[in-house]
Amino acid sequence: MESDDDMIDDSVSMEDDFYSGDLSYSYDDTNGNDYYSDDDNDYGLLEDEDGDDQDAMISRRPQLSYTVLKEADIKQRQEDDISKVSTVLLMSTVEATILLRYFNWNVSKVHDEWFADEEGVRKSVGLLERPVVQVSNSRELICGICFESLLRENITSAACGHPFCFSCWRGYISTTINDGPGCLSLRCPDPSCNAAVGQDMIDKVATCEEKMKYSRYLLRSYIEDRRKTKWCPAPGCEYAVDFSVGGGNFDVSCICSHSFCWNCTEEAHRPVDCDTVAKWIMKNSAESENMNWILANSKPCPKCKRPIEKNQGCMHMTCTPPCKFEFCWLCLGAWADHGERTGGFYACNRYEAAKQEGVYDEAERRREMAKNSLEKYTHYYERWASNQLSRQKALEDLNQMQTVQLEKLSDLQCTPESQLKFITEAWLQIVECRRVLKWTYAYGYYLPEHEHAKRQFFEYLQGEAESGLERLHQCAEKELNKFVTGDGPSKEFDDFRAKLAGLTCVTKNYFENLVRELENGLADVDSQAAAASSKTTSSKNTGGTSKRGGRRKGSSKSGGSSRNVDDTSN
């Protein structure tokens, strides 16, 4: 039996090290190729450090927080857990599987509960020590479902001993398996019996297709029933994630290249918290913005109350059939009461008079608020969506670079591909920064309007990060192109290498600062405000004391100063 460490070595492990300075998620593909590993990095970023400093840098990196599991890894872990329980509790693997399923595949909980109250656990789970029905030794037995008398070899039973024919068992099991994962909690067909039915009975009577379904349900339950494992939510992905650290950063990158938040399973959204993401997604998909638009750009018909949008210049409105009510857009009064005396087609004296009296203040205020809210939402949503599109394009460019252009560039510049890794790192940085920048717009939308200092600081950090990202993106996208499409080696390539690597480093620093501040809730603004307030208060107290001392009369300056000191001490 392999140890947990062996299994982790076989599985795919990733470190969330983007913000620790390492962009290289390392894993092996099925052909043994190592993607994004640091083994062939020729920059020598760590070679200049001495041994102690290098150890210190490594120790500061976050430990592995999750492991990506392939199907073979999941099966191996599941079999190991079953074997542990079977060995310790001296029971069959079928019974151990039933126990683990009942306790959500928690081995330690199985052991604790079993040794605390074995009889109670057996009763709850349905593991019987002996049959509850004693079957006679006659040559024929009666099936408990169809009540036919059949030869003994055509009758079988679970641990409880209730006899049922193979045909009835097959129908019962086939129905439950086709109904879904509930078949994993199968019980004896007898309504009064609580005996569990395990995989041994499935193997005995089910078809090959049904056995495969049952095994698939059992495998999926190992991930879905445990608290620290989840499937990757990407469409068609068969990998799972075992999360081992219970706090802080929940962003996970699967082998399939999909990044998601382990906590809420939405796409990765650091530094924005899950609640903000949920509100933003709900706002984008819900009808709330439609209602805001209706409120801001339409008015209800005074008669039928349906919302009407004004699409021409005239104030004379006619509701659609069957209502056909004619009214004034401004005051919502019947048009029959309007004409030249009320201001004509483009004005309404009644509305202006009523507005001065405050009649329409509330309605106008609500409409204006809705309009402002809609404009604010549009501002942030457009930038959120724009960065999402830019990120998708960057992913396509990254894939094109890795599959086609790196090899071509290596030939043109007579440079090994291992020394062109700075280009891949730049594109990885762009992809990740686009993701972060996208979610900062959701953060900015929900930042309270009255916190002006925080908003200014946030917009400054966001602007600096975005400016750095645009420079990096332009360099990687446009300046690189002339080397890819060139005819041969270029003397400017080394300068381009230094520029792109430098921009990558600078942009990473900008986004590190942005992420750190947002995750801290822009706490620096509060601390600076508190310090400034304390300083102002201290200055006022000092000024007030001097002023009080100055009012006293003294024979000389020195005498006045002496009196001031005495007053302060008192």
Image (tube, rainbow, N blue to C red):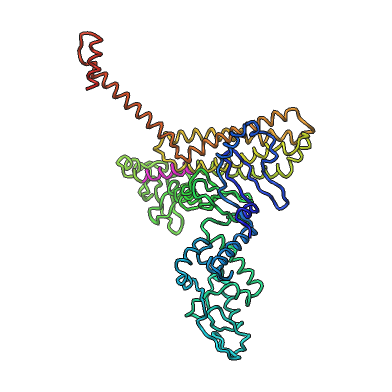
Pinpoint residue 81: horizontal percent, then vertical percent: 57, 62
* Region in magenta: 363-377
Tell me the quarter of the picture where residue 408 sits: top right
The residue lying at 59 percent from left, 72 percent from top is 199
The residue lying at 59 percent from left, 48 percent from top is 253
Relative horizontal placement of residue 61, taking residue 481 as reference (left or right):
left
Q: Is residue 371 magenta?
A: yes
Relative horizontal placement of residue 255, taking residue 299 as reference (left or right):
right
Tell me the quarter of the picture where residue 151 sits: bottom right
Relative horizontal placement of residue 481, taking residue 153 as reference (left or right):
right
Pinpoint residue 345: horizontal percent, then vertical percent: 42, 43
Pinpoint residue 291: horizontal percent, then vertical percent: 45, 51
Is 274 above or below relative to 2?
A: above
Q: Is residue 148 visible?
A: no
**Quarter containing the N terminus:** bottom right
Pinpoint residue 72: horizontal percent, then vertical percent: 65, 59
- Furthest residue toward top: 556
Q: Is residue 408 magenta?
A: no
**Quarter containing the C terminus:** top left
Count of labels in the image: 0
Q: Is residue 566 visible?
A: yes
| Viewer-side residue, 78 vs 55 | 55
